[in-house]
Image: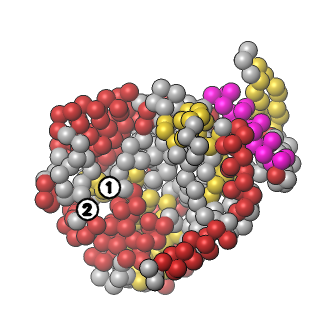
Amino acid sequence: MVYRRYFEAAVSRLKDERRYRVFARLERDVEAFPLANWHRDDGSVEPVTIWCSNDYLGMGQHPDVIAAMVDTAGRVGAGSGGTRNISGTSHAIVELERELADLHGKEAALVFTSGWISNLAAISTIADLLPNCVILSDASNHNSMIEGVKRSRAEKKIFRHNDLAHLEELLIEAGDRPKLVVFESLYSMNGNIAPVADIVALAERYGAMTYVDEVHAVGMYGARGGGVCEREGVMARVHVIEGTLAKGFGTMGGYIAGDAVIIDAIRSYAASFIFTTALPPAVAAAACAAVRLLKRRPDLRAAHQRASHITKHALAAAGLPVLENGSHIVPVMVRDAELCKAASDMLLDRHSIYIQPINYPTVAKGSERLRVTPTPCHTQAHIANLVESLVDVWHTLGIPFVAPPSHLHIEEKSDGKCSYPEIKLAAQ
């Protein structure tokens, strides 16, 4: 085929730039998460520990969530039958949308097939329905938000990441025009948290709508898992909250929540909602079970934060270059695409640890990293093994270490089976 060479050249460019992506074939073990079975190319199967899952709280393995999915599939079947416009809305989705609206204290919610689609559909539709709208978008927003901004016919302006002064400049420039401020509450690659209360206050001062992506925060922050906006007490002041069901809630799908008239307008105008097959009822039921469960389980959120805190400090104490932040995300910086891939491969081959390398275009060139995501299911033994394995990989590949923070004190403890680092914060 005459066109084949163009595709071969495109793939070759990725390989030459050392950012061609290879996906490990993993099969999670519901009885032993975070363990999974790795199906190697030679046909053998090996148990590995997953350290980069976005199933942050292990809800994908929870018996209540699985039971809801199995029961619903057994009663109504595997699929949804088509779009909601063609096949109607399943009762499972109706219940899920009620739970999500309640989670965020909003009048209504709308479920999509993914968080990517929910951002694309909602941002573009809102901006197009506001006459002469200008979108003000954070420079570090996720690809799905960027695509939503691009899809809109509205004017777009980018403000520097979490830069309140720059955002205010752009709000002033926009004058009396309708304005939509779109940003994330928690940025997943660096793990930093936005000053949500300050951004909302600025938007209110200049008459702008706010649209907050809480994808990496829902289920994990706030008294009932409503996200960073709930934790910061500004949830009621945000016009539209977007989230996912595929991370903290451990299933699949995306959603938005807000005033009923806004949600109804998006439902009625967004082509990527209208013409997309609905979530299967079994998936919706499982997601609903996870949302209900996490509303009443702050202990799981506390355990998750503790695991992240211990992991982050244990890695830093070993001199590994952890990017500091205030969230559960633990970026270990490599800053070289080839070394990052080599480190990931060595962790899997030598230490049976799976951490996918993160490279361009997900992050900027020169900021390649291993993105570690502890869960409440990772034990002290898992953490100790991770630290020892990464230290070995760093030494073997010659990746630079950094000096451990002076305020950390490490003591070697034992649980009778293995030694692990205990982290103590020294007085400051």
Q: Between residue 276 and residue 314, name the one nearer to us.
A: 276
Quadrant of image for the N terminus: bottom left
What residue type is disc 2 on?
Thr
What residue type is disc 1 on?
Thr
The residue lying at 60 percent from left, 64 percent from top is 20
Whole-percent x, y for residue 273 in the image: 26, 63
* Earlier-in-chain disc, 2 versus 1: 1
Q: Which residue is mark 2?
A: 276
Q: Are marks 2 and 1 in contact (CB under 8 Å)?
A: yes
Which numbered marker is on residue 113?
Answer: 1
Marks 2 and 1, how far apart in space?
8 Å
Whole-percent x, y for residue 209 in the image: 38, 68
The residue lying at 73 percent from left, 15 percent from top is 416
Task: Give yes or no for residue 392 being in the magenta stretch.
Answer: yes
Q: Between residue 310 and residue 1, name the one nearer to us.
A: 1
**Image position of 184 with respect to 206: above or below:** above
- Quarter assignment of residue 274: bottom left
Q: Is residue 294 left or right of residue 411?
A: left
- Quarter assignment of residue 423: top right
- Quarter assignment of residue 391: top right
Q: Rate crowding at label 1 as few (under 14), some (14 to 19) or many (20 or more) other CA atoms within 10 Å.
A: many
Q: Which residues are magenta?
A: 379-396
**Image position of 258 with respect to 313: above or below:** below
Quadrant of image for the C terminus: top right
Q: Between residue 86 and residue 408, name the one nearer to us.
A: 86
Residue 192 seen anywhere in this rendered image of the structure: no
Query: Could you say whether the residue bearing mark 2 is in a helix, strand or loop?
Result: loop
Task: Give yes or no for residue 372 being in the magenta stretch.
Answer: no
Colour scheme of the picture:
secondary structure
Whole-percent x, y for residue 105 in the image: 32, 48
Query: Could you say whether the residue bearing mark 1 is in a helix, strand or loop?
Result: loop
